[in-house]
């Protein structure tokens, strides 16, 4: 057999649990390349070095597989249940990370799809599988394939599904006969602007353009360095990721109301960390091994121990988790990561200022010790905090 139709492909995909499938041409993404270049030049990639790769690479499938003839795009939905109330002493996890690590889940499904297509065709296919981990504008390909449109919140949206899904792609040297040319989904945001108004940090520069440096998802997952005071306030109760600009989207209202489960069980809350994580649990982890033992196989690994513990200290202060005051003081003294010590000193001081004189006195002692910390950033944090604490002493 030499060719495959889109309908045949969809039938084969359904056999491996992939129901949202489409195909895009492998031509370079010229228009999106211009948007990407502006985004890079304006510094909206913040500290994400991997997004500074050459725009040609990010927009040209043939750079990734020279023999590519078409790109299969799949969407796999994760859990769409309303977020539960926050348990005191816990931090919030964005839905996409509730279950098992989606990179592996999507990769496996796409490889299964390749197997069934190869058996059907009766010959091997040259291919590459991608799911997030790559230099390729996946949303642009989803739009080109006709799977969905790009919302003002920059998310790929499938009108009847919403946007709570992952994208994955198969680049291969197979031509797919399209029964009718896929066209961009005719749906659009219309006059809605809920996400632009609803983003708590004002991260959208304009429609469909995000300044990642202001996005809670970036700050809690990708940012490796210290959070500024403004950023600490912004992250609120989010320990990992953020769902706000999707939760306010009308396209997600029905899926959330119907409490739709994940399309594949591995992505559901029972297979991974779920919607909230104990801050105490995170703050007590003192080694990368311990972190790995707990979070291995989930997307939360991406933040690394020092990043998640930094976030946990900030969320503890933001959510008035005063029960954690003694633990935070211990972390401020003994955590191996200067980043974690720095944010724990700050969180202890913020809590103490609310708790009264006794706690302020304890924090003064902590600050005396932290003023001699081996790390410069910790010592600098103390200088700033001292001026602030004087107000409460
Ligand atoms: C870097 C990155 C991030 C960064 C930056 C996000 C961003 N908006 O750029 C950060 C860390 C902030 C992030 C956050 C999230 N991410 Co992310 N992220 C990526 C990654 C690796 C690259 C995105 C990228 O290329 N950004 C650069 C900008 C320029 O590209 P873009 O926004 O996609 O480009 C669009 C604009 O140019 C726009 N556009 C189109 N027409 C026009 C017209 C005009 C006039 C203009 C101005 C623009 C414009 O369309 C382009 C695409 O078509 C992709 C995976 C991948 N390889 O694509 C995942 C990906 C986009 N992320 C994903 C997810 C799930 C998330 C989060 C929801 C996670 C969370 N809950 O915390 C949030 C959502 C935040 C948001 N509103 O975007 C999914 C999105 C799936 C979907 N349904 O769209 C992806 C596709 C991963 C995957 N394989 O599933 N992410
Ligand atoms: S993920 Fe959160 S912080 Fe980022 S753009 Fe959306 S609402 Fe704003
Ligand atoms: S919230 Fe409104 S403007 Fe934003 S992506 Fe959804 S439909 Fe578009």
Image (tube, grey):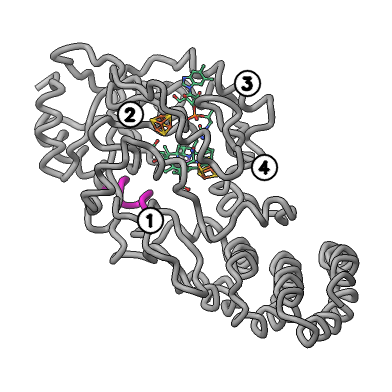
Q: Nearer the viewer, mark 2 or mark 1?
A: 1
Among the two numbered marks 3 and 1 on one chain, the one whose residue lies closer to the N terminus: 3
Tags 3 and 1 in contact by the CB under 8 Å rule? no
| Secondary structure category for the residue under label 4 | loop
Tags 1 and 4 in contact by the CB under 8 Å rule? no
Query: Mark 1 highlights which residue?
Result: 101
Tags 4 and 2 in contact by the CB under 8 Å rule? no
Query: Mark 3 highlights which residue?
Result: 38
Residue 348 placed where, x, y %?
A: 72, 75
Measured along the vertical axis of the image, is residue 189 above or below residue 245? above
| Secondary structure category for the residue under label 1 | loop
**Under 8 Å from ligand 1: the CB of mark 3?**
yes
Query: Mark 2 highlights which residue?
Result: 171
Query: Mark 4 highlights which residue?
Result: 47
In the displayed structure image, the side of residue 150 where residue 218 appears, left or right: right
In the displayed structure image, the side of residue 331 where residue 72 appears, left or right: left
Quarter of the picture containing the C terminus is: bottom right
Q: Residue at x 61, y 61 (%)?
A: 307
Among the two numbered marks 1 and 4 on one chain, the one whose residue lies closer to the N terminus: 4
Residue 137 placed where, x, y %?
A: 45, 28
Predominant secondary structure, magenta span: helix
| Secondary structure category for the residue under label 3 | helix
Alpha carbon separation for disc pair 3 and 1: 31 Å
- Residue 354 is marked as none
Is residue 102 one of those drawn in magenta?
A: yes
Alpha carbon separation for disc pair 1 and 4: 23 Å
């Amino acid at each position: 057999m030499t060719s495959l139709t889109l309908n045949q492909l969809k039938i084969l995909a359904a056999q491996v649990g992939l129901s949202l499938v489409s195909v895009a041409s492998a031509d370079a993404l010229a228009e999106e390349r211009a948007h990407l270049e502006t985004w890079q030049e304006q510094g909206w990639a913040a500290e994400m070095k991997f997004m500074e790769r050459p725009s040609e690479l990010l927009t040209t499938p043939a750079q990734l597989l020279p023999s590519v003839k078409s790109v299969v795009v799949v969407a796999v939905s994760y859990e769409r249940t309303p977020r539960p109330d926050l348990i005191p002493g816990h931090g919030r996890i964005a839905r996409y990370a509730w279950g098992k690590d989606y990179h592996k889940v999507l990769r496996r499904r796409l490889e299964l799809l390749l197997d069934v297509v190869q058996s059907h065709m009766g010959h091997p296919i040259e291919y590459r599988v991608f799911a997030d981990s790559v230099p390729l504008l996946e949303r642009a390909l989803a739009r080109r394939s006709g799977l969905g449109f790009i919302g003002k919140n920059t998310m790929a949206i499938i009108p009847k599904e919403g946007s709570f899904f992952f994208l994955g792609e198969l680049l291969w040297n197979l031509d797919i006969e399209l029964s009718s040319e896929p066209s961009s989904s005719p749906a659009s945001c219309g006059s809605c602007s809920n996400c632009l108004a609803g983003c708590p940090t004002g991260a959208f520069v304009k429609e469909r353009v995000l300044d990642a440096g202001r996005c809670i998802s970036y700050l809690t997952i990708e940012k490796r360095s210290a959070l500024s005071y403004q950023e600490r306030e912004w992250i609120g109760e989010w320990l990992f990721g953020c769902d706000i600009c999707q939760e306010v989207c009308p396209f997600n209202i029905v899926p959330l109301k119907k409490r739709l489960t994940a399309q594949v069980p591995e992505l559901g809350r029972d297979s991974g960390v779920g919607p909230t994580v104990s801050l105490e649990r995170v703050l007590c982890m003192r080694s990368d091994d311990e972190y790995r033992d707990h979070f291995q196989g989930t997307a939360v690994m991406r933040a690394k121990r020092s990043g998640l513990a930094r976030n946990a200290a900030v969320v503890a202060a933001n959510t008035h988790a005063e029960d954690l005051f003694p633990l935070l003081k211990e972390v401020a003294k003994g955590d191996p990561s200067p980043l974690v010590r720095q944010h724990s000193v700050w969180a202890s001081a913020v809590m103490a200022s609310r708790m009264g004189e006794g706690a302020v006195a304890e924090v003064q002692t902590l600050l005396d010790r932290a003023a001699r910390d081996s790390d410069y950033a910790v010592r600098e944090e103390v200088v700033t905090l001292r001026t602030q604490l004087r107000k409460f002493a």
